[in-house]
Image (cartoon, rainbow, N blue to C red):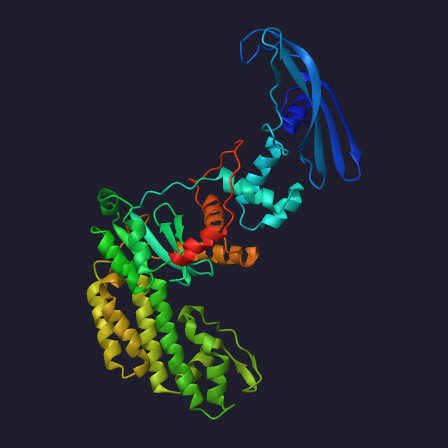
């Protein structure tokens, strides 16, 4: 059981020995607490002479420290007067900053809740019985984002957003792939904007970047090779496989459209194409009744029936499986010759739908091979962490419903996801609210 002394200290930020009187009563959904502190022997802050008590003044401080209840502290602050210079001053306020209507405890709780991207500004405001503007002003005032250092292993990805500058429809997300957290968010992924951003760093800092992982957006590659002279650029393996799957899907649909509607072949390619994405070991051998064929069939049997439809489809599937096996099992040492063999197989396949993918393998050959390096914790080079961050940001963008304040968005996201960003509560309030002049600067960038 929590001692009463500790409870009072935790609730009001004062020790019980300092309290002269404490009365609390409930009025509807609000707790009112009337507090007077004991008389102290204080010296004058102006001349250091002794002082005497000179009345009290009631201060109202918002302090909802109980869940589902509002709270108000009626603090009767003692005024002191200097016997020598006759100047007056108030005792130190233990509940809040001078001139503030909200308590330290309330501000601290708001800042902790701002670290959870699942909570909207509105939800935090309602939980603490304050306005949305107040919540936003605390974020604006108490979180400072310093210029981050460049990591040795940098990931670059993008996120579609209307907050991007006019020259881009995407925000750019910069990730520390070694320590696994976002280091910055830029409001454009354009080549000019990225070069300008990275040029702020010294040559020594940029030369420290050894790996840059990207999707297949060519300006990222150009910027990386321009700015980071010692880096190796790697493309995210997921994006390569995604392009392969897209090309294979075009082959399947092309063959399906040549089949008679609702025929066995059409049914199999339309209804059971998901089996073509499974590995052989994952196919279920338990038979189940199939209404189309009026008999029990296993997933493996259905898959064999699909392959019997077309030799072209079987060849395309074998090529896709071969690349996926390469993607899962190749090492940096054997990736080069293994990839060259696969490129040759794709070129000889005769599947025109694979032509674009084959050209992509040739163009990005070096970057694909670089993705098999494992510089940290035996992890391949990939943008998997960036994709995870993007999914959180997309959910947060949906939560804030089209907000256009990029400065506030960037500050909250980095505060929530970067463990090196902290908050510091002070008596100074600033605002990152977008003004007409800031909107014009974005437009004229």
Q: Position of residue 231 (x, y in %)?
A: 23, 52
Residue at 37%, 45% in the rendered image: 179
Residue at 72%, 39% in the rendered image: 69
Residue at 70%, 29% in the rendered image: 73
Q: Position of residue 26 (x, y in %)?
A: 79, 34
Q: Position of residue 144 (x, y in %)?
A: 44, 39
Figure check: 415 above or below 324: above
Left or right of residue 245, residue 106 in this image: right
> Can the viewer see residue 406 in this picture?
no
Quarter containing the N terminus: top right
Q: Nearer the viewer, residue 103 or 352?
A: 103
Image quadrant where residue 356 sits: bottom left
Residue at 21%, 70% in the rendered image: 340
Q: Nearer the viewer, residue 433 or 232?
A: 433
Quarter containing the C terminus: bottom left
Figure check: 394 above or below 412: below
């Amino acid at each position: 059981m929590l001692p009463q002394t500790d409870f009072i200290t935790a609730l009001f930020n004062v020790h019980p020995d300092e309290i002269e009187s404490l009365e609390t009563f409930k009025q509807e959904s609000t707790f009112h607490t009337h507090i007077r502190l004991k008389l102290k022997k204080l010296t004058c802050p102006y001349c250091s002479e002794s002082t005497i008590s000179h009345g009290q003044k009631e201060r109202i401080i918002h302090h909802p420290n109980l869940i589902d209840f509002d709270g108000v502290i009626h603090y009767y602050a003692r005024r002191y007067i200097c016997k020598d210079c006759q100047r007056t001053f108030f005792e130190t306020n233990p509940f809040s900053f001078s001139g503030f209507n909200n308590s330290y405890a309330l501000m601290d709780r708001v800042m902790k809740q701002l670290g959870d991207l699942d909570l909207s500004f509105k939800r935090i405001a309602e939980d603490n019985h304050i306005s949305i503007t107040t919540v936003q002003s605390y974020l604006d005032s108490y979180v400072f984002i310093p210029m981050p250092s460049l990591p040795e292993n940098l990931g670059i990805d993008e996120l579609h957003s209307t907050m991007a500058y006019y020259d881009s429809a995407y925000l750019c997300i910069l990730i520390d792939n070694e320590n696994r957290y976002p280091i910055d968010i830029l409001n454009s992924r354009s080549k000019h904007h990225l070069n300008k951003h990275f040029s702020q760093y010294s040559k020594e800092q940029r030369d420290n970047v050894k790996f840059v992982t990207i999707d297949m957006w060519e300006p990222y590659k150009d910027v990386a090779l321009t700015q980071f002279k010692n880096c190796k650029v790697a493309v995210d393996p997921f994006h390569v496989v995604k392009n392969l799957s897209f090309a294979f899907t075009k082959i399947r649909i092309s063959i399906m459209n040549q089949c008679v509607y609702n025929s066995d072949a059409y049914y199999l390619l339309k209804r059971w194409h998901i089996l073509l994405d499974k590995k052989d070991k994952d196919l279920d051998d338990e038979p189940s009744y199939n209404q189309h064929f009026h008999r029990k069939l296993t997933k493996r049997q259905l898959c064999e029936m699909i392959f019997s439809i077309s030799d072209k489809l079987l060849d395309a599937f074998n090529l896709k499986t071969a690349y996926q096996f390469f993607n899962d099992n190749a090492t940096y040492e054997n990736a080069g010759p293994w990839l060259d063999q696969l490129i040759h197989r794709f070129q000889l396949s005769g599947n025109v739908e694979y032509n674009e993918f084959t050209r992509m393998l040739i163009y990005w050959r070096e970057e694909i091979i670089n993705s098999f390096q494992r510089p940290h914790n035996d992890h391949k080079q990939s943008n998997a962490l960036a994709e995870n961050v993007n999914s959180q940001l997309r959910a947060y963008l949906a939560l804030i419903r089209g907000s256009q304040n990029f400065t506030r968005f960037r500050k909250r996201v980095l505060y929530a996801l970067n463990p090196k960003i902290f908050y510091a509560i002070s008596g100074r309030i600033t605002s990152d609210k977008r003004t007409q002049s800031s909107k014009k600067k974005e437009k004229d960038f």
